[in-house]
Amino acid sequence: MSFTTEERRNIARLLPDMRRRQILIGMGATAAIGAIGLPRGLRAAASGTLTVAANANPSSLDPATGGSGSDHVFLFNFYDTLIDWTPDTLEPVPGLARAFSFSDPKTLVLDLQEGVTFHDGTPLDAEAVKLNLDRSREAQVSNIRADLETVESVEVTGPLQVTLHLKEPDSALPLILSDRAGMMISPKALSEAEGGRVDRAPVGAGPWKFTGWTDGERVAGEAYSGYWRQGAPGVGNIELLVVPEPTTRLRAVQSGQAQIAYQLSERQIPIIKRTPNLTLMETPTLYVYNLYLNAGRGALQDPRVRRALSLAIDRDAFLLATQAGVGEAAYGLLPKMHWAYSPEPQTLNAHDPDKAAALMKEAGVSGLELDFRGYPDQASVQRQEVIMSQLARIGVKGRFTNAPIAESSGRFFGPEKIGDVLLSAWTGRPDPSMSYDLVFSQNSYFNTGKVAAPDGFDAAIAASRATPDQAERKAALATAQKLGAESSISIPLTVRYEVDAFAEGVENFTANLLGKPKFNAVTRVG
């Protein structure tokens, strides 16, 4: 692929200063074949097994029906995405689409890789992509309809070409297609699946073919012999063990039961460093611990009450108590290093218990008792204890009911809407507009109360996507961040770092800014 001088200048304007760990805009108007995940020189056939200690049971292995951020680490093994991203910068690069370009601001053209097949042998062609995109944006079973709200229609414009016609310009769309919306499922599998969903029987076009899922124990796959990326995956079999406790995950890799353990505790860093034959990987992420509020019920309908809860929380104390001070206090869904970060949410919601108490009094609320939901692992329970201690200072009472991640989050965000508050995390999305849109937009899955977004919020998100200019995008996203902080239907707490450990002999394992590892390039020596 070649670029005109003007195209190169445009790309340069969109992607300034590509330092490691800096997060860049995901316009991707035209992308060069880059260093991540594209066909490599042919290697020997993959062999051996890679065992990974994972932090949670998946909610679903159907990318459109799941609702947990922890699902991605499982999904990436069985599905490739239409567009990919680089681990360090989240810059969009080709994936199942070998090329992608905006022919005009409201038209995105995808040219697909040749010769790609799903795990059942059926071709991944333009018709298959259209079917998947239409399902994701229209089907009632889809939890990601909000991701593709700007898409007016999907047109097959060639055997291996799909054209997306947009309602309005959307510079975030390439990176949206690097997430769940870009994961393609075999049309044959969908047509044969009960209810049109493949929650427990994924048939994608990723590096491994699904072989089994034992709930709460393991998810497994074997290398797909027809995988389109030459030389990948690096191992013949992959096994993800479901191990919610960080201590047990570390023990698994220390003992050799697993070769990689991810999302370990910050307090385990010294132990990893002291353990022979283990390597520590510690990197910034977009992972934010978060209180999700059901703003559609009871006293939480009042934005003054929600702001009071946010003002009552001492995030610096929370960070020290729960993360050993590793990470940063969070007042929005973006870390300070992010190009789109705005400091205004911190100004609005800095710890102020007196102001919190005054807002509760103004709202006529006292002795507020809430139904809190969370997870049963030791680290989660510790976070719960700190939160309850801090909220008690403004008279808020309640207790946590805990269940595994997929169950607790599914009951809170799904049709049941069980609970007032969920202590969980926002695991980040490749483009910053996605995070704010998916948490605050009225029809988003993660807006459990389905309350209307603050006045001006939707316009700010649209403005952030209407232009490739980073400065203009940042200004629009600053408005969205301010309005989100004022509404407080979610209360960010802290940004966490990715803490992973891997064993001697593991090669080509890299972290990424999403904090959601991919394993397709990993190899084992010995």
Image: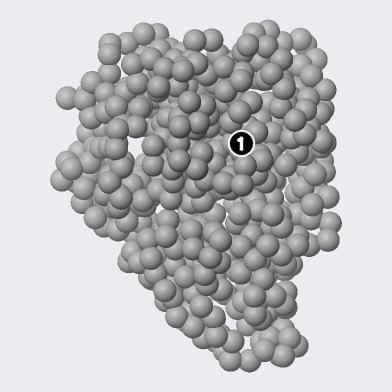
- In front of the other: 203 or 382: 203
Q: Residue at x 48, y 79 (%)?
A: 388
| Image mark count | 1
Q: Is residue 161 left or right of residue 289?
A: right
Residue 312, by quadrant, is bottom right
Color encoding of the figure: one colour
Q: Quadrant of the C terminus?
A: top left
Decide: is 402 above or below 33. below
On the question of residue 468 being in view, the answer is no
Residue 210, by quadrant, is top left
Residue 230, by quadrant, is top left
In x, y percent, where is residue 126? 61, 18
In x, y percent, where is residue 97? 59, 19
**Badge 1 density bin: few <14, some 14–19, many ≥20, Cα 10 Å:** some
Q: Residue at x 44, y 63 (%)?
A: 408
Decide: is 309 above or below 208. below
On the question of residue 371 being in view, the answer is yes
Q: Is residue 382 left or right of residue 433?
A: left
Q: Is residue 151 left or right of residue 51?
A: right
In x, y percent, where is residue 35? 51, 19
* Residue named by callout 1: 135
The amino acid at mark 1 is: Arg
Q: Quadrant of the N terminus?
A: top right
